[in-house]
Image (cartoon, rainbow, N blue to C red):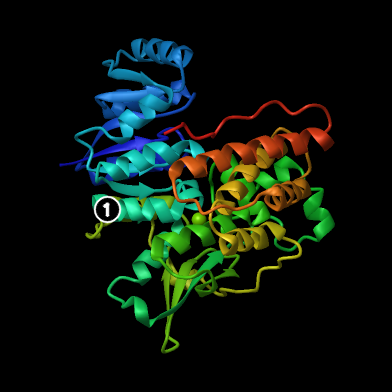
Amino acid sequence: MKAISILGSTGSIGQNTLKVVEHLGNIRVVAMAAGRNMAVFAEQIARFKPEMVSCDDEACAQSLEKELHRLKAAKPAIELNSKGLINVATHPEAECVVSATVGAVGFVPTLRAIEAGKRIALANKETLVMAGELMTAAAEKYGAEILPVDSEHNAIHQCLRGERRSEVKRLILTASGGPFRTKTREEIEDATVEQALAHPNWKMGEKITIDSATLMNKGLEVIEARWLFGFDADQISVIVHPQSVVHSMVEMVDGSVIAQMGVTDMKHAIQYALTYPDRQPNCLPPLDLRNLANLTFEEPDLERFPCLRLAHDALRKGGTMPAVLNAANEIAVQAFLDKKIGLGRIAEINRSVMDEHESSNADSFEEILAADSWARERAIIKLNETAAGNVKHYNAGQPVSL
Ligand code: MG
């Protein structure tokens, strides 16, 4: 029986991972970490009986103990905050770590799991956006395999199976286009939180749903693809495909385009990452081709969705610039979710923090973490210059130090 640990078990990917575990029936969850949702966490612990768990702080641990007592569940070892996350990520029995925390907080725990040589089922794209070069070098050094759970990258991973890298012309990431695909620039800039959270195809956490509305998510995915698959920025393109049936494609040098299709459910990619190189029946309905009367594809509009352009710029600049964009964006998205700024301000804040940053080589994880902190501070200063009322000092999602 395979043993896994999960970082971020109460989030959307974490909950779906547990459904896959339940379906497969031959996987043991030895350790789990969650942030603050202790009611859901307690139920997960009662059901999956991990040996070790971790949550944000002492207050969370106390409410977790209460919930476990109420459920008459056995109490595992309870660890706290960043140290706890790292201990879950490096649990000696876990062969595979599902890295599914939101934002930069998963960075160091994922690195530690890589250094321990574990398979990483990677949903936390920030890890590769911030430090793709160093992370993939570490994975090679320690023999850790990174399996993408992000649906687009999971699709590309499948399309590349058995292909020679030298025969690949380009990777084509599909984007649903989000809820504002057909809206004007003004409508997008003035959109409410509720409108931005209404994603047409995918059910996901709040941060990634807002990133999908601005197409920042696709931008971050371009950077993620750069490091996961080792192709240059100009070999990675994006096409808007509103039906989200084709999860991504690879174009070969002979003009063949290989696409991966499936139902829009993250359990598909999660199971692939857990069982690879095997394939097993999953718990999802089959893709009914008869219902696919029309699949459409269109060019993304960089004027209406400037965040996508910013990501391309950050990738071309390289060094610490992608980490800076990622950090500024996390702050700006949180401020939008808290209704301190409009949706259009997210790209402006990202752009102005990038403009101020002198990108350095990103030769060490310390340098990347320093650029991350710097960008968060600058983004908060910029928010306070213009936002209605003072913006609190956001630090949710900030990576733990090395
Ligand atoms: Mg994705």
Relative to 63, is 260 above or below? below
Question: How far across and how far down the image is residue 197, in percent?
Answer: 65, 44
Crowd class of label 1 (few under 14; some 14 to 19; many from 20; radius 10 Å) = few
Residue 373: image x %, image y %?
Answer: 58, 36
Question: Is disc 1 placed on a helix, strand or loop?
Answer: helix
- Mark 1 CB within 8 Å of ligand 1: no
- Quadrant in the picture for residue 217: bottom right
Q: Is residue 202 visible?
A: yes
Residue 52, compared with residue 221, is above or below; it is: above
Q: Nearer the viewer, residue 308 or 26?
A: 308
Quadrant that contains the N terminus: top left
Residue at 54% of width from left, 34% of height from top? Answer: 397
Query: Which residue is at the front of the view, 171 or 367?
Result: 367
| 356 and 249: which is toward the camera | 356
- Going by the numbered disc 1, the residue's amino acid type is Lys
Tell me the quadrant of the picture where the C terminus can be found: top left
Residue 301: x and y in percent read 71, 68
Q: Residue at x 29, y 16 (%)?
A: 73
Residue sticking out furthest to the left: 1
- Residue at left offset 29%, top offset 30%: 31
Q: Quadrant of residue 382?
A: top right
Q: How many marks?
A: 1
Does 284 sit left or right of 382 as displayed? left
Query: Left or right of 229: which side holds 116?
Result: left
Q: Nearer the viewer, residue 71 or 395?
A: 395
Label 1: which residue? 141
Asked if residue 340 can be seen in this view, the reply is no
Is 129 drawn above or below residue 397 in the view shown?
below
**Residue drawn at 32 percent across, 35 percent down:** 89
Measured as percent of width and height from the top left, residue 231 is found at 44, 70
Question: Looking at the rendering, which quadrant does residue 9 occupy?
Answer: top left
